[in-house]
Structures are given as C-alpha cells and as structure tokens.
Image (cartoon, helix red, strand yellow):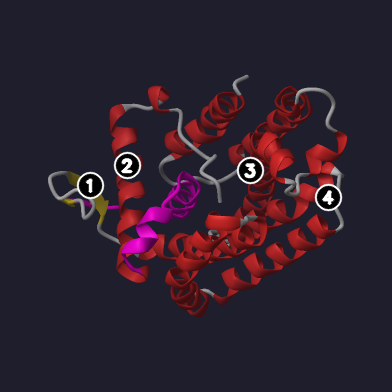
Amino acid sequence: MFGYIRIAKPELKVKEYEMYKAVYCSLCRVLGKNYGIWSRFTLSYDFTFLALLNMSLTDVCDLTERKRCVCNPLKKCNYCKNDDYFKMPAAAAMIMVYYKLLDNISDEKGIKKVGYGLVRPLFAHARKKAARLFPELEKIISEYISEQSALEKDNCAELDRAADPTAKALSKILVMCGRDEKQIRILERIGYCLGRYIYLLDAACDLPDDIKKGSYNFLKYNTEGDPHEYAKKRIVPQLYFCFNEAGKAFELLDIKKYRPILGNIIYLGLEDTFKKELNV
C-alpha cells in the first residue's frame, strides 16, 4: 500500500486524534513484536485504517495503556492492550511490502536495484511467517501481483482494467474484517472503491517519473502535453467517484465505534490527500 488513506487531522477532535494515534502506534508495536524491528519502517496509514476498521465492527471496549516508544524512548505513547485486531493488518503489510520489493527489484536499475535486493532477505522471513498465519492473505496478494504483472507486460492502457487487480485485492482484504453476510457485502464495495482510488492516485503521482524511467504506467500511453496536468485532468474525476461511492457504502455499515474517525478518513481525508499529492 502507499499511505494514501489518511485522516484530515484539523477536522478531528483531540480525543479522536489520540485514539487514531493509539491505533497507529499499536500497529507499529505488533509489527515489531511479530516481524522484527525492520518491519516498523513499513508502517503506513493504509494499514492503520485497516486495523481501525477491524476494531470498529465489534462492541468490545478497547483499553489503552501508556508506554515508552521503542523508536523514541524519551516519548510515551498510548497503545491498545488487545493485539488481536492488529495481527491481520500487520500480516497484510508484511506480505504486501515483500511483493512490492520484488516489483521494485524488477523495475529499478543500478544502485537502487542493488539496495532493494539487499533489503529483500529481511522481509522474506517476515512474509513467510505472515503467510503461515494468514494463508488467505498470501493467496489474495500473490494473485493480485500476478494479475497486475500480466497487465503491465501487455502494456494495458485501459483505466478500468489497470485498476481492477488492486481494487479486487483490497476488496478481499477488507472482507476479512466482516462478521456477517451484510457486513461482508458492504466491506467488499468499500474495499473495491478504496483500492481503485489508491491505484489511480499512485499512477497519477508517478506518471512524470515513470515516463522518464520507461516504467509501466497506463496513463503514459495517452499522455497529452504536460504529464502532471494530463494526469490531474484524467484522474481527478475518477477519484471523486471512488470516495463518493465508498462513502455511500460506508453509510450502510453497522459501525460499533470510531465512526467519526473512519468518516473523517472517507469523507474528508481522501479528498484532502489527493489534492495535496496532485497539487489540485
């Protein structure tokens, strides 16, 4: 994932922001505890959203405790005492990061390629452990990578086809948070819309660099004039559609807690993020 599913911090109450930080820090702790210190550097807002969503569908009270931060011992952070809701998001992060590393090794040249190759063994073990704990995640993500690679080899220039593997993968991952059939159907739709949003925004942000490096990007086959301006013109309407549809589905979800934080991300954070990333 790419860190595009963020909060709009100024619009959150202090207590809501503190809870969001507790989830973020708790995910960091679980990553380090289960997969080693290097895994902490892969922490992203996307998987924090996944952990928060996983927690929000139960009515169990989430107790917190205050402890020192491993990365900054001079600082104390709030952590959730129950690690259960963080295990699946942490495993998803490890598997996704490993396959992203393989993709980078394939795409890059020179010193960057060597660097990614040196880092790969650090995450190979973490990915194997995560796959043992959550084989369904391994299946979802490996199939997604395979489908995406096939499209890239074919130089696919169709927006819907190019975005579909990422959208389907996130849809299936969010479904793992569901507790009943109704929740599963709604989560499937939210996940698909968010996955599509992530893919399209990343493609728009990377277009100028991908053109320079000769890397795959479905947008570059139809570029007109300035790549950045073309990307904004082509992608921005699609991004609005994605988070509007995600918002409609979110309204139907039976959220037990943290609705204001999740709503902040979907209704405000997604729009705020793409406007900053694309300088709209």
Q: Is the residue under label 3 in contact with that under label 4 (CB below 8 Å)?
A: no
| Within-10-Å neighbours for mark 4: few <14, some 14–19, many 20+ | few
Q: Which of the marked residues, 1 or 4, is nearer the chain's N terminus? A: 1
Quadrant assignment, res 176: bottom right
Amino acid carrying mark 1 in the image: Asn
Which residues are drawn in magenta? Answer: 36-65
215 or 45: nearer the eye?
A: 215
Marks 2, 3: nearer the viewer? 3
Instruction: Give the vertical position of 139 relative to 15 (above or below).
Output: below
User: Rounded to the nearest whole Å, what is the CA distance between mark 4 and mark 2?
Assistant: 36 Å
Amino acid residing under circle 2: Lys
Cα–Cα gap, marks 2 and 3: 22 Å
Foreground disc of the pair 1, 3: 3
Residue 122 highlighted magenta (yes or no): no
Q: Is residue 107 left or right of residue 7?
A: right
Vertical side of 149 occupied by 25: above or below: above
Predominant SS along the magenta part: helix
Label 3 belongs to which residue? 198
Tell which circle, 2 or 3, labels the residue nearer the N-terminal end: 2
Q: CA distance from mark 1 to mark 3?
A: 29 Å
Give the mark nearer the N terminus: 4 vs 3: 4
Percent across and percent down for residue 259 are: 46, 38
Number of other residues with Cα within 10 Å of mark 1, as a class: few under 14, some 14 to 19, many 20 or more:
many
Which dot marks residue 78?
1
Residue 161: mark? 4
Residue type marked 3: Ile
Q: What label does residue 21 carry, if any?
A: 2
